[in-house]
Image (tube, grey):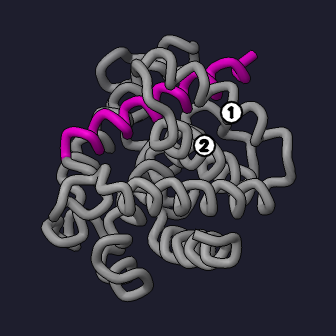
Amino acid sequence: MNHAEGELEGSRLQKAVETIVMTPEAATKLVDGYRATFEDKFKRKPESLEDRRRIAAKIIGRYSKLSAAAGAATAAPSVIPGIGTAVAVLGGGAADIAVALKLQVDMCMCLVEVYETELSSEDKKHLAFTIALAGSAEQMATKGGKAAVQKIAEKLVYQYLRGPALVTIKQLFKRVSITFTQKAMAKAIPAGVGVAFSGSTNYVLTRVVGRVAVAVLAKDVK
């Protein structure tokens, strides 16, 4: 793949994902539901770091299960909105990776809401995209145990967070796109699975991205 093709594919993937991700306002509403459930159960607001970790764990569990069910060809649009749009923009196979990334960005949007309530909507969105994409890109590119990959991904996220947000997000989409294309060309992805490798791989990938997000975000809590 040459530079121009990588640029094109990355920008198409970015367009598809940005079209179908949830809004920061929708993430706030979803997280408010988890906060309300917590208050009902424990009779107090979830303010400590440990309280936030409890809510974060629920969110990661939710999105890992959704991700396991994802696959543009099989998932019901009512379960994961945006699949039709992703297929229209990218075609079937690449739509799977757009849907997988959408779920990881949605999850990170909710996790940002848990830990960074004071940020503007735009900053929440940029932070969620950067964490989700950097965490996912590192795992797709790296061979190794989960713990090692998670540590590498955390360092990568910190590096990317120091750069200009919009440029960084564009670079990350390009990186994910090129890595995925290389794996597909190398037949590293089982036939008939599309991107999403498999439901179990999606599940694990989403959980690790969630853990990377919490590790990065929790360190910012004073």
Amino acid, disc 1: Leu
Q: Quadrant of residue 41?
A: top left
Instruction: Identify the residue position indicated by label 1 in the image.
Output: 156
- Is the residue 148 above or below the residue 63 in the image? above
Tell me which label, 1 or 2, sits earlier in the chain.
2
How far apart marks 1 and 2 lie (CA) works out to 7 Å
Residue at image location 56% in from the left, 74% down from the top: 9
Residue at image location 42% in from the left, 30% down from the top: 208
Residue 212 picture location, percent across and down: 53, 28
Say whether residue 205 is magenta: yes
Dot 2, how many residues are within 10 Å of its Cα: few (below 14), some (14-19), or many (20+)?
many
Helix, strand or loop at label 2? It is: helix
Q: Nearer the viewer, residue 57 or 161?
A: 161
Amino acid, disc 2: Ala
Q: Nearer the viewer, residue 214 or 147?
A: 147
Magenta span: predominant SS is helix
Helix, strand or loop at label 1? It is: helix
Say whether residue 2 is magenta: no
Q: Quadrant of residue 34?
A: top left
| Contact, mark 1 vs mark 2 (Cβ under 8 Å) | yes
Residue 152 picture location, percent across and down: 60, 24
Residue at image location 37% in from the left, 71% down from the top: 94
The C terminus sits in image quarter: top right
Residue at image location 32% in from the left, 44% down from the top: 63
- Is the residue 57 above or below the residue 183 in the image? above
Q: Nearer the viewer, residue 208 or 82?
A: 208
Q: Quadrant of residue 216?
A: top right
Dot label at residue 134 = 2
Q: Which residues are magenta?
A: 199-222
